[in-house]
């Protein structure tokens, strides 16, 4: 009688930090080599294997071939806003689902803080997704119309930065893409730790989980919602009430990427048929304070 076939588990992302560390420890390989592997993939985002990572032991190469892939996700499409300040990435996951991430380029010198010009310069922020779909079901958010499908692994979250780094040098990360990050807490925390380690070395103060108080003008999501966008005048009046009467420090979100459905609340795994073109005009800070 023939025995039943045993399913072979899919290889994991090298950016699944806790898994690769435990596998290395189990066979006596130093975790010191893990940042070197991450650096290699970051510098060679299209590499098909990990045989080119320098200075590893024979046992390490064998383990990587058996259980890991450089990335488990694939960048399948991009779309640029007309002003070229925003790029949306469509990323296909190993399970066949897709998520979107958004690169936002802006110049903080064009914004103001308490009516005064802000210091700084040109920088890029990456808006990352933490889930496929979302359980919250917010009626003003296109992602909510998908329902909840799956959590991303920490490696799949980190891989969004790997893909985005092909287009911009990312300085800031915001967990404001698809999904509710706190509903995927363990992967969220692990991804943040990787972001702050070598080779990414992002400052913790430049990583934002969507728990901050700010005002986000409604971004249209087609027939999925009957809401309408408030006028700039009404948004400023509301901010004035919060700040002046209740002493609540609030920001008004800078709208970016509406023409490619890349603004807040518009991510729903869809892309325009053609990439937009046009000259770049840098915007002020994504969360510019206005009085």
Image (spheres, rainbow, N blue to C red):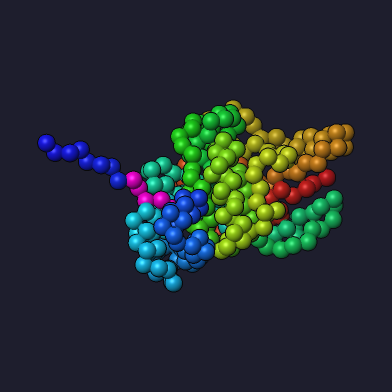
Q: Is residue 257 visible?
A: no
Seen as rendered, the residue at the extreme bottom is 55
Residue 124 x %, y %: 62, 58
Q: Residue at x 67, y 54 (%)?
A: 204
Judge from the rendering whether residue 22 lies leftward or rightward of residue 209; answer left or right. Answer: left
Quadrant showing the C terminus: top right
Q: Is residue 31 visible?
A: yes
Judge from the rendering whether residue 96 lies leftward or rightward of residue 100; answer left or right. Answer: left
Residue 265 lies in the magenta stretch: no
Residue 283 x %, y %: 68, 55
Q: Which residue is nearer to you in this view: 261 or 146?
A: 146
Q: Which residues are magenta?
A: 9-13
Q: Which residue is nearer to you in this view: 190 or 58?
A: 58
Q: Which residue is nearer to you in this view: 48 or 143?
A: 48
Q: Residue at x 50, y 50 (%)?
A: 18
Would you identify the image quadrant in which residue 240 lies?
top right
Please tell me whether the stretch drawn in magenta is mainly helix, strand or loop. Answer: loop
Residue 49 x %, y %: 37, 62
Judge from the rendering whether residue 276 lies leftward or rightward of residue 122; answer left or right. Answer: left
Q: Residue at x 78, y 48 (%)?
A: 289
Residue 262 x %, y %: 56, 46
Q: Residue at x 82, y 38 (%)?
A: 248
Seen as rendered, the residue at the extreme left is 1
């Amino acid at each position: 009688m023939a025995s039943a076939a045993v399913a072979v588990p899919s290889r994991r992302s090298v950016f699944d930090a806790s898994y690769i560390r435990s596998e290395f420890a189990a066979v006596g390989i130093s975790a010191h080599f893990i940042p070197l592997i991450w650096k290699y993939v970051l510098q060679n985002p299209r590499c098909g294997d990990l045989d080119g990572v320098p200075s590893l032991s024979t046992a390490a190469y064998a383990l990587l071939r058996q259980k890991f892939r450089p990335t488990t996700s694939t960048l399948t499409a991009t779309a640029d806003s007309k002003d070229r300040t925003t790029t949306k990435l469509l990323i296909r996951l190993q399970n066949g689902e897709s998520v979107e991430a958004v690169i936002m380029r802006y110049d903080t010198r064009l914004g103001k803080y308490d009516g005064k010009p802000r210091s700084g310069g040109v920088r890029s922020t990456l808006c990352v997704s933490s889930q496929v779909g979302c359980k919250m079901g917010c009626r003003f958010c296109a992602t909510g119309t998908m329902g909840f499908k799956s959590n991303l692994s920490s490696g799949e979250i980190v891989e969004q930065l790997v893909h985005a780094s092909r287009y911009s040098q990312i300085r800031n990360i915001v967990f404001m893409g698809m999904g509710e990050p706190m509903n995927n807490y363990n992967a969220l925390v692990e991804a943040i730790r990787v972001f702050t380690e070598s080779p990414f070395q992002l400052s913790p103060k430049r990583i934002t989980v969507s728990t901050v108080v700010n005002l986000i003008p409604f971004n249209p999501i087609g027939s999925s919602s009957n809401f309408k966008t408030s006028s700039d005048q009404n948004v400023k009046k509301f901010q004035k009430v919060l700040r002046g009467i209740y002493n609540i420090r609030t920001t008004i979100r800078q709208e970016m990427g509406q023409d490619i459905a890349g603004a807040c609340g518009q991510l729903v795994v869809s892309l325009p048929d053609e990439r937009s073109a046009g000259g770049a005009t840098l915007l002020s800070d994504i969360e510019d304070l206005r009085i």
